[in-house]
Amino acid sequence: MLLLCASGAYADEGMWMINTIDRVLEKKMKAGGLKLDGRMIYDEEKESLSDAVVALAFSCTGSMISDDGLMITNHHCAYSDIHALSTMDHNYLEDGFWAMTREEELPVKGQAIYFLKKIFDVTGEVQRLRDSLDVATRPMAMRRVYKLIEDKYAVLYQGQGELICSSYYNGNRYYMALYQVYRDVRLVAAPPVCLASFGGDTDNWEWPQHKGDFAIYRIYTAPDGSPAEYAPGNVPMHPKKILKIAQNGVRDGDFAMVIGYPGRTNRYASSYAVEEILHIQNPIQAQFRMDQMKILEKWMNEEADVRLKYADKYFGLSNVQEIREGEIYCYNRFDVVEAKRAGEQRLQKWLGDSDLIYQLGRKYEDVAAINQQIVYFQETMVRGTNLHRYANALSRGDTVLAAKELAKLDMRVERDLLRYSLRQFYKYVHREYWGDYLTQVYDRTGGNVDAVLNDVFDGHIRDALISCKIGPFNEKRDKIEAGVSKNQLERDYKDAVYRMKLAGNQPMYPDANSTMRLTYGKVCPLSPRDAVTLASLTTTAGILEKYNPDDYDFSLKPEVRDLLEKHPGIPVNFLTDNDITGGNSGSPVLNARGELIGLAFDGNKESLAGDTYYVEAMNRCICVDIRYVLWILREYAHADNLLAEIL
């Protein structure tokens, strides 16, 4: 089994378009163990597995598991919704939430669930529109192109759903997707974070893990079954397809298939693009977010109400910070830049006398300094504080909205965050980009950041946040680029890669773009380092081994610990070698018969080059075992009502 995993005999790099399962791909999947016909995975005319897979506003994936509209996804995908529904009296993050009747289910504001109905090729039409609007010289014109083509088909499919046109293969192909969208969504079940996210940020992107990372919603419709906004008289939806729960669990070598909505990848990026990420973007983002997390941690550990207010913000910070740090590690460990350079040598040979690759490298050199300045600006004055909505409401004179935004914040925390951001801003951003207010107050206070901070909080919050704008940075970059932009050359480079692979008849999947994709592989262990092999399955015994009441990430509610001590061998998480990325969170993991064996929720640290480069031997998908989900529902929540509906 170890040899099979290492060799990739069954696994396949790629997030394949769900509507392009051809004989070649189906044959490869069947060689890996698939027991289904390809038409049972996706079929526009008949019921298929894809009908049970949904997008949660294209940020995560979910799947239908009951005839009365139950939809399961990851807890971390539902985190913001659970956070928004929580109060100090009813902290559903810490205590969990279980609706024992449908009347107890909680309406979720702002959620939207997308069901794919069909997808079709509109390449010729889009390319003709694109050429007629001269998109090459007017970058924003592509928005106009999408609107025109979507409006055209909206007439043809009036009343049947929402249409979204997407680009594939760097604009060489375009497909239109028709979605049915449901907006009456209600929270049904969510375990407490000590179960859902045991190990927290410490274990994030690591293996082994022990997370019960799931949550359950129910989708409602109007009484006639049509999509509708929330109303008390709405009824549970009856999906076209639901997933059957697997009963036999998983073993090494078992076929595993993931269907979901991966967000964005950039697998065909140049070596120069990777260098920019490695040396400019990621080091700044990783360091600044780590420092901001430390500020939040201090306050969150001291006061419970601050922890509740900032739990969602901290969760977002930590996830990105660890990704950026992990990408740096992987880019260096796996020599990604050099691997990309080797590919560019092959491309140059195919291109002949073209100087495209040379020009691309020169352009990245030219804009490196200004791009670094932009990252410093964005990480300090754009996203370094949570005061923007409050400041904007004040500037419009909307005191009611300002009060609502202020209630979401703790100004002591915001003061510390802004102090840090101002220090980094003045240290790293060149004076020519500071803007009038931040320049004047710096000079007036003699560069004393605490004095600047006092001035800002003495009625100048809005002035501080809008003083420095992106415009001057972009103007400087435009002057440096003078002619063909770096982005246009990068697009030309990707187009050349596409044409070379097409000419060589090489199978090529498009970069992820938040559309439905399929990946296949198998359950298998991981060998992350020399002489280290990690098993593919964890159990509840590992939770007790890691338990530490003095560490929030590894603490447990007393009743949870007592229950786990009685059940030390329940399967918790497992590994597959499926190719996934952000957006796949919550995706159903299916066995050879299309039955639900788990939910994808994370990747391993060694796979974090994956947005730009796939490392076959190291790529893993971490999944919560459906048996653990059922065990929590049965033994902890005593949610017999849900079990009866699901099984």
Image (cartoon, rainbow, N blue to C red):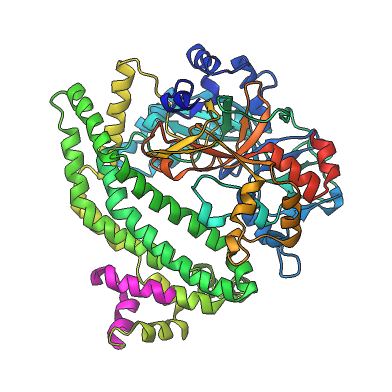
Q: Where on the picture, by quarter, is residue 136?
A: top left
Where residue 399 sits in the image (x, y, percent)? Answer: 60, 76
Between residues 605 and 224, which one lies in front from this camera angle? 605
Secondary structure mainly formed by the magenta segment: helix
Q: Is residue 538 visible?
A: yes
Please tell me which residue is depicted at 42% across the width and 36% down the height of the picture.
618
Where residue 526 sits in the image (x, y, percent)? Answer: 47, 36
Q: Is residue 161 visible?
A: no
Which residue is most to the front? 531
Which residue is most to the left? 353
Above or below for 501 versus 146: above
Magenta region: which residues?
A: 418-444
Whether the magenta-drawn stretch holds residue 439 is answered as: yes
Above or below for 93 versus 69: below
**Total numbered badges shown on the rendered structure:** 0
Q: Where on the picture, by quarter, is residue 548?
A: bottom right
Quarter holding the C terminus? top right
Where residue 237 sits in the image (x, y, percent)? Answer: 78, 37
Whether the magenta-drawn stretch holds residue 226 is answered as: no
Between residues 542 and 71, which one lies in front from this camera angle? 542
Please tell me which residue is depicted at 29% across the width and 43% down the height of the picture.
273
Where residue 290 sits in the image (x, y, percent)? Answer: 42, 63
Q: Where on the picture, by quarter, is residue 339?
A: top left
